[in-house]
Image (spheres, helix red, strand yellow):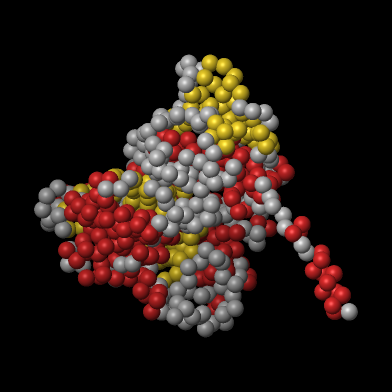
Amino acid sequence: MNDLLSSATTSDYDASSIQVLEDMEHVRLRPGMYIGGKDDRALHHMVAEIIDNSMDEAVAGHATWIEVELHENGHVTVRDNGRGIPIDPHPKDPSKTALEIIFCTLNAGGKFSGDSYETSGGLHGVGSSVVNALSDHLRVEVARNRELYMMEFSRGIPQAPLAKIGAAPNRRGTSVTFHPDPEIFGSLKLKPARLFKMSRSKAYLFSGVEIRWKSAIADGETPQEATFKFPGGLADYLGETLNGATTYAERPFAGTVDFKDKYNVPGKVEWAINWTPSRDGFIQSYCNTVPTPEGGTHEAGFWAAILKGIKAYGELANNRKAAQITREDLATGGCALVSCFIREPEFVGQTKDRLATTDAARMVEGAVRDHFDNWLAADTKSAGAILDFLVLRAEERLRRRQEKETQRKTATKKLRLPGKLTDCSSNTRDGTELFIVEGDSAGGSAKMARNRVNQALLPLRGKILNVLGAASSKLGTNAEISDLTQALGVGLGSKFSLDDLRYDKIIIMTDADVDGAHIAALLMTFFFTQMRPMIDAGHLYLACPPLFRLTQGAKRVYCIDEAERDEWLEKGLGGKGKIDVSRFKGLGEMDAKDLKETTMDPKSRKLIRVTIDEDEPGETSDLVERLMGKKPELRFQYIQENARFVVELDV
């Protein structure tokens, strides 16, 4: 019986069971091998493949502009004024033109020998053919030798031979129009915003090219026509990305090095980096204009140069703590862009998400390091600010490593805490502090300025609900109020219990401006109406961040308002030279060192304890109701009654 079963099974599996798929069939059956799948990212990757071919022409010096156009019917066109795809018969198969070989055969292209392109984003010879295979319609127009040629395909199959369709005396280059196949991508559509961003980033990556954008599809946010050309390259890109945020260096560390000059090989590296307290750090890297979201050897070389440079500068500045700085510290608040062009790069996978070329690390590090050393030495003010920030970050990291994560041993041990809360590690309530901060940007600086043992942070997005101006049913469903009560470990109103309070001090820390005062007023109204015993017991405080920093030589003074600033300006700081006045726009614009010294360190900060002083019972309640309640006429009446007491309004 076993012999019969074995014989039957063997006879069913013979040479006819082995399938041999043509190139286009294999791409359609397994698109994930070539573009990563059938999802939205893969869909837009198809456009990137065609744009990269045009970018290779531009980088090689043969094209000056590229046009990306999204049509109303979902087709997309990429045009350039390069040399145009060759249209003559291919030597290995004279029955087919070079154009047909490129669009219908895997592992075919002009990027292998290095004779046509010194550096290129297309490497494997599959980009154009994969796009063709996964499109239900694709048309190629080529202008060469004053003649215009055209060829059309459907799902990788030529619909007719290459045809000469007329004269083109004033035109040159290649135009590719295609429509992603719904059989592969279903109902997914190309998005104007995503293509717009992709097109603009290419212009930043190669300053010599002009990118023209057109879209017949309006999404309400993306312009339907635009032209990009950025002579400043990545420095311009970084400036737009940071969008006016406060940075530790007035100008980014940016530059370009040609590998021919330094290593006698084709290629170059361009970079731009700055540090800011206003947002989390990031790095965006590219190789031959292709995004590498997973990084690779070029990123490793860049960070190695920055790390060695900042440590060497710290040693020169006699800052022993600089030796503790790691790459992890550099990436905190460090916003970087790195773009390299190298010959025959090696990527991990066809989608080129990670660069694997070993020599890239060595060349990028060597090219960037010398320039970084010179930049630090030439701008000691920026270098000192960056070094202070990184040392503070390293100290915070080391504290985290030394301290074990432990849950507080209280009755609220199993309390579900909000995800935005950055808790402290103390096991008891005594001496602990919760800072309620305005926004994530302020929370970023406060995280590094705090004492992790006893200081916790809870960022609030925008203005909290006015509990006197809203229906009572909204209190239980409001996300900010829910986060706040969970962090404090208490209930609202009659359910409030002082014994359940998780922190000794609740500190409202908002910007020293009108919006900050409004947020503080809303929070105090909330605590007064819902958690008054906490105020009566002396647990609620207001932080006093300074509005100005005055610097004169080595002397530095912080001022709480204009009056204190003017007083110091009049009498002087006792230093040498001109007094430099800096105005803090908000907590998110302060670096961690300033925030720690002025607002969070108990040794040097100022706090205002919130108290209730009533000469007559209910006086404070009546005032809060008039100013914060549902009846605007009461507020108007109060303003009329007290307007005569306003001496000066400083806007």
**On screen, residue 39 above or below 98:** below
**On screen, residue 229 above or below 424:** above
The residue sitting at 59% across, 78% down in the picture is 414
Residue 219 image point, x, y percent: 60, 35
The residue sitting at 68% across, 31% down in the picture is 159
Residue 39 image point, x, y percent: 64, 50
Q: Quadrant of residue 305?
A: bottom left
Q: Foreground: 591 or 637?
A: 591
Residue 130 image point, x, y percent: 60, 44
- Quarter of the image containing the C terminus? top left
Residue 444 image point, x, y percent: 42, 60
- Quarter of the image containing the N terminus? bottom right
Q: Left or right? Give the position of 500 relative to 594.
A: right
Q: Left or right? Give the position of 576 relative to 290.
A: left
The residue sitting at 60% across, 63% down in the picture is 482
The residue sitting at 62% across, 58% down in the picture is 478
